[in-house]
Amino acid sequence: MELQEIWSSFLTKLSQSELVESCYRKNITGIPFLYVKVNKTDVSAWDDHGFSIISACSKQAMFQKRVTVETNFVRQDATPQFVYRHRFYVPQEKMFCCGNLCPDCIRLRKRT
């Protein structure tokens, strides 16, 4: 599955960041959560740049793939560990022609 490759690439890139001590993904009731442990000296830097680092690593992992990402902050532990609801998903749009002459057929879409 391509999403597994994207997750693997994303976690590798995120763990290579100088602010991140460790990171991993955990599924709870089917919802993927991202756990990022930060060095105690870099907590304020992560507060300022955490979303931009996660976003940049996500963009690199999704490069040339039809996938989008959604990230929401959940909580911060005292360790300091940050928890995000982070998921990659395929947009809900038709990607092939089913042959039923649908009004939103992909064959009729203009390329930009």
Image (spheres, rainbow, N blue to C red):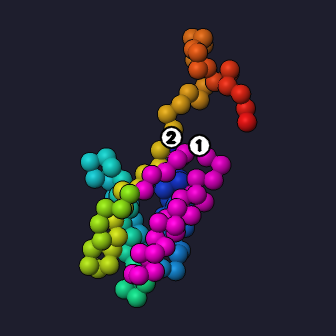
The numbered dot on residue 90 is 2
Q: Mark 2, residues whose alpha carbon is within 10 Å: few (<14), some, or many (≥20)? A: few
Percent coordinates x, y for residue 79 in the rendering: 29, 80
Which span of residues is magenta-colored?
Answer: 43-71
Q: Of the two numbered discs 2 and 1 on the same chain, state the one appearing first in sequence.
A: 1
Kindly indicate whether the residue at mark 1 contacts the one at mark 2 (C-beta within 8 angstroms): yes
| Viewport quadrant of the C terminus | top right
Residue 12 visible in the snapshot: no
Amino acid on which the number 1 mark rests in the picture: Arg
SS for dot 1:
loop
Q: Which one is in front, 10 or 44?
A: 44
Would you say residue 67 sits in the magenta stretch? Answer: yes
Amino acid on which the number 2 mark rests in the picture: Val
Residue under the point 64% across and 24% down: 106
What residue did someone put label 1 on? 66
Q: Is residue 30 left or right of residue 23?
A: left
Percent coordinates x, y for residue 103 in the rendering: 58, 15
